[in-house]
Each structure stands twice: as C-alpha cells, then as structure tokens.
Image (cartoon, coloured by chain):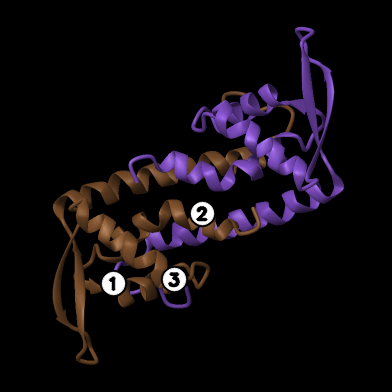
Chain colours: A purple, B brown
Amino acid sequence: MAHPPVDLLRGTLDLLILKAVSGGSEHGYGVARWIERATGGALQIEEGSLYPALHRLEDRRLIGAEWGLSDNNRRARFYRLTPEGRRRLKSETANWTRFARAIFAALEASPQSAPAGA
Amino acid sequence: MAHPPVDLLRGTLDLLILKAVSGGSEHGYGVARWIERATGGALQIEEGSLYPALHRLEDRRLIGAEWGLSDNNRRARFYRLTPEGRRRLKSETANWTRFARAIFAALEASPQSAPAGA
C-alpha cells in the first residue's frame, strides 16, 4: 500500500494501452506519452512495464505491430488495435468502470453496515 | 486482463480492509462479508487473499487484533483500526480516488490527442 499508483496501474495498464492505440497506429513512446497526458500526469509509464505489456497484447492478438519511422526518423514499432482488441477495449472499459464504481461505493459506505441494496 | 477484478482488487484490498474495520472491531469473516456487501457483490474476497492481507496490515500496525467470540460463540480474531491506520485510510482513500479519476479521464479521452490541460 506504500505505492497504490503502481498497484492500480498494474491492473489497468493493458486497458490504457488498448485505449491509446484505438485511434490509429502509435509507437511505444507515443503510447506512454499519451497515457501520461490523458491521466494528467497521474500515471507515469516506465519502459520496463510498457514493453512487456505491448508484447503481451501483441501475443494475444489484441494489438498488431509493424515497423515504421517515427517523427524524428528513427525506426520504431507501431501498434494498432485489432478487431478483437477493439472488442476487448469495450468490454474491459465496462468492467473497469463497474469495479471502480463498486470500490467508490464501498469507500463511501458506513464501515459497519453496508448500504441497503448495495 | 482476463481477470481485471482480481488485478484491481489486489491494489485496493488493503484499503477496503482498513475501511471495513474503521467503524469498530470486526472479525475476518465479517470484514470479507462487509466488503462484498458494500461493493454490491462486485468483489468476492477469498480467504487466501484476506488473511495474508490482515496479517500484513497488523505487522505494519495499521490494524490491531485481539481474540474474542463471534456471534456463534466461536473463537475469532477481531481487528480494529489503529490511529496510524486511520491516517493511512484517509490518505489512501484520497490517493485511490485521484488515480481512479485519472484513469476514468483517460478512458473518456480521445485516443490520439489528450484533452487540453488534462
């Protein structure tokens, strides 16, 4: 619990990567920067977390990858969402939202008695 | 990503336990049942996750424990929040809320361009 951001991030990094590449092809550095910007800097993505996650998602065919040139003319792998990845993004976004709301509800509940109907 | 609830839970179980015992003394079974009720059944707490977490929190002196009798007259350990645990509950609730909101913001952002000022 000393580092809740990291714990929280671990479970949702894959989801945020799918979101980051859902608008078109993006290289790894761009994915990390997008996540940092879109979360207002709350999540900092380390390369040691990012690249294993990208490979894992590629292995599961949720994203596809091909070599290309970045803006500064360096060779980089560009990632895009597959149709299966798009379905997964939708279902996991719904899952994430449901569970985050459930936790919010618990954090706002009375500690000794759960809210009626909750 | 096959089991986002479990991933999400791992990072927040300690926090929910602190919340569960913040209103008074509670035994382990009661903690698990409270979390399940307060999250509307969205989070199911396994004993294999619960008891290690309780011991961890006790080791860190965020909760205290003593033996007592449960409603059905069985010997059980009862947990309560320490002053340090109460401070931690407050700060971690704020952390969790901040990071969950950051992820919500990213999930709602345009995938290719982060919202201005986000």
Choose between A96 and A83: the one closer to the eye: A83
Say which residue appears at 26% left-offset and 61% top-offset. B55
Please state the horizontal and vertical placement of residue A100, each as a whole percent of the image. Answer: 52, 55
Label 1 amino acid? Gln
Q: Taking B50 as reference, is A57 above or below it? A: above
Q: Which residue is mark 3?
A: B46
Q: CA distance from mark 2 to mark 3?
A: 14 Å
Residue at far bottom of view: B72
Q: Which residue is mark 2?
A: B8
Q: Secondary structure at mark 1?
A: loop
Residue B115 in view, yes or no: no
- Residue at the spot 51% in from the left edge and 27% down from the top edge: A41
The residue pinned by badge 1 equals: A112
* Neighbourhood count class around disc 3 (C-alpha, 10 Å): few under 14, some 14–19, many 20 upward: few
Tag 3 near tag 1, CB within 8 Å: no
In the rendered image, the vertical position of residue B12 relative to residue A37, given as above or below: below
